Amino acid sequence: MKAKSKIIGLMEQQRTNKAMKILILANRASGLYLFRKELLAQLIANNYLIYFSVPQKSDDLYVEKLIKLGAKHIYTKIDRRGINPFKDYCVVRNYKKTIKNIKPNIILTYTVKPNIYGNYAANKFKIPVIMNITGIGTSLISHKLKFLIKILYKYACSKSNTVFFQNLSNKGFFLENSLVNQEKTKLIPGSGVNLEKFKPLGKT
């Protein structure tokens, strides 16, 4: 899959030794497993140490599946849709604590809050970040705080080393709103689909 190979290619460029640590910040363990299982499996097979931070605890079904895959779980509480500044500050603080403890070589972020707050936290430690924009959603279009969210995203993009987009529409939105510099962007054709697992149904 092209998306997986591009991310792995960037990982290889950053590689310094066989014990390279990758920290993944996301807001759903299920999304990581269902859409990025093959990427994680390949990175683990390539001798990377994978840590994933999600707001689901160790007894979650998909957390258990990711652990069995060989990744190391970190619980980080996130209110995915909340706008409480204290709770969001706690996310940044916890990300900083995680980064300080793990000392990752590189960080991958997915979805809005991990994208924004992950870059804030990583910047303190000068850790390179690959941000993934998997969709714009309502936060940047119709949310009552969309102006603030755009400011936060612009800062996060300025600190990120690479920003992946999965379609031209999302990339165009970020460029038109001056949220990201063109040279930092890379376009990938979606998250990829495992055709061995998800096979098209025949005509009925």
Image: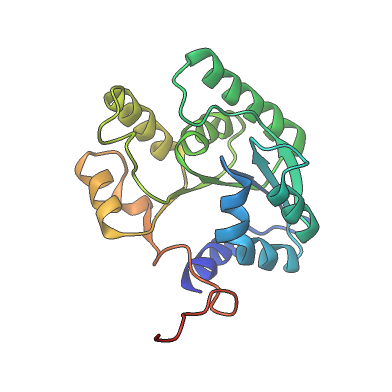
Total of numbered circles in the picture? 0
- In the image, residue 10 lies at what x, y percent? 54, 61
- In the image, residue 173 lies at what x, y percent? 24, 46
Q: In the image as oriented, which residue stretches furthest toward the left?
A: 176
In front of the other: 141 or 173: 141
- In the image, residue 135 lies at what x, y percent? 37, 49
Query: Which residue is found at the position 28% from the left and 44% from the top?
Result: 174
Quadrant containing the C terminus is bottom left
In front of the other: 79 or 114: 79
Name the image quarter holding residue 151. Answer: top left
Q: In the image as oriented, which residue stretches furthest toward the bottom?
A: 203
Whether residue 162 sits left or right of residue 104 in the image: it is left
Name the image quarter holding residue 97. Answer: top right
Q: In the image as oriented, which residue stretches furthest toward the front?
A: 204
Residue 20 seen from this side = no
Vertical comparison of 113 with 184: above or below:
above
Name the image quarter holding residue 150. Answer: top left
Query: Which residue is found at the position 44% from the left and 86% from the top?
Result: 202
Vertical comparison of 43 with 162: above or below:
below
Vertical comparison of 157 with 162: above or below:
above
Query: Which residue is found at the position 55% from the left and 60% from the top?
Result: 35
Whether residue 54 sits left or right of residue 88 in the image: it is right
Vertical comparison of 3 with 141: above or below:
below
In front of the other: 107 or 109: 109
Colour pattern: rainbow
Whether residue 146 sits left or right of residue 102 in the image: it is left
- In the image, residue 116 lies at what x, y percent? 46, 33
In front of the other: 15 or 61: 61
Residue 102 seen from this side = yes
